[in-house]
Image (cartoon, helix red, strand yellow):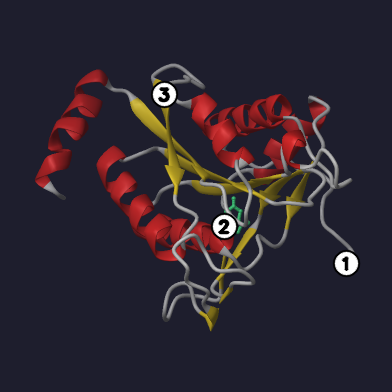
Amino acid sequence: IDLQYIPTLLFGILTMKKTVLVTGFAPFGGETLNPSWQVAKQLHGWQPIAEVEVVAVELACAFLESAEQLSQLIAKLQPCLVLAIGQAGGRTQICLEHVAINLIEARIPDNAGRQPSGVPVVEGGPDAYFCQLPLKSMLKALHQHAIPAAISYTAGTYVCNSTFYHLCHLRKKMHLPVGFIHIPYAPSQTISNGVASLGLDLALTAVKLCIQVALTSNNDDSYQTGTLD
Ligand code: PCA
């Protein structure tokens, strides 16, 4: 471990405070905001349960940079949970991602100008990882609060999937609970194009509920989910 992280670690041990790392992404694809960061930044300093505090960080929407940022943050903060959030433009509901695949197919360049195609996220890594958070319990909580949400079985092939895959890969090494939530566009991004959006307040409530369930429930509820197509 890097010496510069020792004060943070000592502080954590002395105060018994645990950290939840929540990330959102920078805007990309010509947008001026990314709802994932608009939501994540409001969680900075929030205490989902006693002795646990959220640290929110904006990730670059770039394959290499976001992975590097995440591994440094995890080494520094030693979080007890990492929840990454991303924008899924056009989706109609909150999506709790079940799967991360070891494939990058970038339809547009990332914010660093790279556009990899047909390459693995991690050379030699498994084809896929499944999320190990209690997704069904999280989904049930969202539905009980009347928030449109589903479990999704693809996080795409762009920076979000790649970030989620990196997180799962780190989870394996560090026994770290990790998850990924895609949220629809914010209403301000869709005022004249007729595309679906979700209010940022509702998205914020959804992410808060997911964090609380992830921290407090260790077995997954049975709850009807899945897709036919
Ligand atoms: N959404 C993109 C990358 C960053 C973001 O917020 C994605 O779904 O891959």
In the drawing, what numbered circle is on residue 229? 1
Q: Quadrant of the C terminus?
A: bottom right
Other-residue count near label 1 (Cα within 10 Å), few / some / many at <14 / 14–19 / ≥20: few
Q: Horizontal placement of 41 versus 228: left or right?
A: left
Task: Indicate if the residue with disc 2 has its beta carbon within 8 Å of ligand 1.
Answer: yes
- Residue highlighted by disc 2: 160
Q: Horizontal placement of 71 versus 190: left or right?
A: left
Q: How far apart are the alpha carbons under marks 3 and 2?
A: 26 Å
What residue is shown at x 41% (from left), y 24% (from top)?
A: 53
- Residue type at tag 3: Val
Q: Earlier in the sequence, mark 3 or mark 1?
A: 3
Q: How far apart are the alpha carbons under marks 2 and 1?
A: 22 Å
- Residue highlighted by disc 3: 52
Q: Position of residue 62 (x, y in %)?
A: 46, 60
Q: Position of residue 75 (x, y in %)?
A: 27, 47
132 and 154: which one is in front? 154
- The reply to whether discs 2 and 1 touch (Cβ–Cβ < 8 Å) is no
- Residue type at tag 1: Asp
Q: What is the total number of numbered labels drawn onto the structure image?
A: 3
Other-residue count near label 2 (Cα within 10 Å), few / some / many at <14 / 14–19 / ≥20: many
Q: Can residue 134 be seen from the camera position used here?
A: yes
Using the image, determine if residue 173 lies above or below residue 43: below
Q: Quadrant of residue 137?
A: top right
